[in-house]
Amino acid sequence: MPVSPSYFSRLPHFNDSFVHVQELNRKYARLPTLHPSQVERVAWKTKDQYRLSIGEHVKARDYAACIALVKRLNQIHPDLMPEEVKAGLQPFKRNINIFLNRPKSVPIDQFGRSHGVGKRKSSIARAWLVEGTGEVLINGKPMNEAFGRVHDRESALWGLKSTDRLDKYNVWALVGGGGSTGQAEALAMAIAKALIVHEPPLKTPLRRAGCITRDPRTVERKKPGHVKARKSPAWVKR
Amino acid sequence: MASINCWRCLARPSQRLLLAPVFVAASAPTSAAFSTSTQLSAKTPEGNTRHVRTGKRLILGRKKRTPDKTKPPLSGERKAFRKRIQLSNDNALQVSGLDVLSAENVVNPDSVGKVFGVPSPEVIDQLRTCEAFKSSQNWNLFRSPHMLVRKETVDLAKQMTDAIEKKETLRLVITGNRGSGKSIVGLQALTTGFLNKWVVINIPEGQELTTAATEYSTIPNSEMFSQPVYTVKLMQAIYQTNQSILSQYKVELDHLQLPISVTRNMTLAGLLNATKEPEFSWPVFQAFWKELRLPGRPPILFSLDGLAHIMRVSEYRSPAFELIHSHDLSLVRMFAEALGGKTSFANGAVILGVTSKGNAPIIPSMEKAIAQASAAQKGEQIPPRDPFSRKYDERVFDSLRGVKVLDVQGVSKVEARALMEYWAASGVLRSRVDEKNVSEKWTMAGNGVVAEMERVAFYDLRAAL
């Protein structure tokens, strides 16, 4: 005789877990709970992840009903959380709780400099920001020698300009690779990242200014049978 | 009446609207009322058939070239237009409340960061005659010439006046990055010279002397070459700009070897103006130069723009068809010896060489000599010459021995603000001039490089247009 009464159903593991969760819910319904906003965030498995982990094709509706109960159980006050419940919730948790990840904080060094790296096309820029009066040196050259176009100069300092910080910081930067447009935009990203170290609340305005997100567009590779990435050779009759 | 959209017609109602509306005319055969072909093929009252579309048509093979009836510009007209100096613009606003530059102002440290007008008309005329204004400078944007007095200006004016008070010779080279205002500082030095009643000699472009653009001839019993036409031009410029000073001094030496007769009661101005013959110009100019350096004569300001051009082998050829070194040209040698300290000046003098970055050949020896002079002036370790380089020219090192160096960099923010306020008051700059705007333009212009500031400040204007 099988151990599980649902051995002959299509979803034995899920049914067992679901029934167990329902029983736990009934049993511990009276334990004090926390407000959902106060509960520590847990990375629950999505339907697809759960299906993959137990190898059963769980219906979306059933999984939604089950996970709602699981979340209700998780609201029980952590001090009073029974071991039984912890074990019962385990199959629904992901192995790694991504909500415990903390971004690595970049420190400002002893000289008051912050460091940021940015990329665009094939250019890489490193920028060091220090509080100052708006002096800029790029590869040891002043702004007008580093970028001939005024447009490039503006886009390089766009992060500082859009947040009104142009006269508050000095920039010392190294840029390499690519052309002048790519270098300018890589520098914009590097400067924005270095600026966030000094003033973290500026992250949102900088994101809106388009300085945080790496632009993923690069040169498309050439394909065999084509003259360039997309161009086909001219058709020749025989 | 039948509807315009006949239901048997295959065209969509929307397309049918584009066709000419077909009215059932009395003459049309009633048996084929649903067909439009008879109407379409029928001639319209104007006589055109319907299938001839109106509007633009592609016409091939009938290209007619109308010959340009305007006259082409005469020879030299285009260059004259390109090189013309326009010093005033009636469309620009008059800026009131600005002082006029004077001999006291220009050495006063308090006038740093202020804009001054150039004394009109006498100094403007003098500067124009000695070609101190250049066509690359945007004087034509403003009502009248004004200049920003910056730290370097006051510094240079102070050095100049101090040297001349002590009857010493100040030999100085103005260097700096491209667009940082070296020529304008040179112009301000010339203005200082005119205001202080010195004898001002200006060679506006070193390039004109060495690119084989003016005539030259050998000097008898000498290895040098004179440039007679240019010398006449220079003598006339000196005569016109310094006439009031030079006419106070009389000729003191006997000039028996000169081709023209020079008497003792002739003034120096008269000596300069005595001949316009190119053949006689160089000996007369030499005599003038000798007279000018006698004790008791006024101080001299001798300036040259585009120093790199006179520090190389010129494009002139000797009778043996060898290239002539620039320092073998007599006028250039006169300047080079004065700058190198070989010429003595009894009454005090300022010898000013202004380098250029826009139009300049790369002269390794000049760069090294200036770097060494600059290091010596700051009391730093003097950078040694590259022991393996063959590009060094000893004559260049000689001509730059012991010169002082004035490095012109970007303007400070205070100066930048004064400049932008002047632009705004002239009506060129339409945006607000506030702390934020000034520092933004200052940063964008590579820490206040003046020419770049102008470019950046008017960039928005150009973009908006």
Image: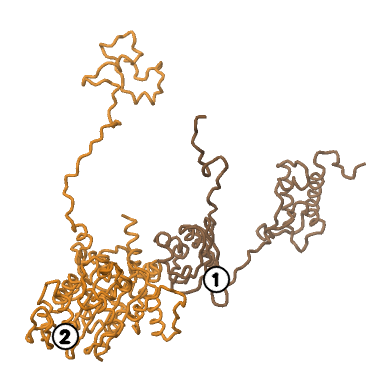
Chain colours: A brown, B orange
- Say which quadrant the C terminus of chain B sits in: bottom left
Determine which quarter of the picture holds residue A102. Answer: bottom right
Q: Residues within 10 Å of mark 1 (few under 14, many from 20)?
A: many
What secondary structure is found at the residue carrying circle 2?
helix
Residue B365 percent across, percent down from the top left: 38, 75
| Nearer the camera: disc 2 or disc 1 | 2
Determine which quarter of the picture holds residue B448. Answer: bottom left
A236 or B53: nearer the viewer = A236
Residue A99 percent across, percent down from the top left: 67, 59
Residue B296 percent across, percent down from the top left: 17, 90
Quick check: B53 left or right of B436?
left
> Quick check: can you spot residue B249?
no
Are both tags, 2 and 1, on one chain? no
Quick check: A145 left or right of B320?
right
B283 or A35: nearer the viewer = B283
The single residue placed furthest to the right in the displayed view is A1
- Say which quadrant the N terminus of chain B sits in: top left
What secondary structure is found at the residue carrying circle 1?
strand
| Residue B380 badge | none
Please, which chain is the residue tagged with disc 1 on?
Answer: A
> Quick check: can you spot residue A11?
yes
Residue B159 percent across, percent down from the top left: 29, 85
Q: Which residue is mark 1?
A: A114
Q: Amino acid at mark 2?
A: Glu
How many numbered discs, if any?
2
Real-space CA distance between mark 2 and mark 1, rounded to the nearest whole angstrom: 65 Å
Q: Amino acid at mark 1?
A: Ser
Q: Which residue is mark 2?
A: B291
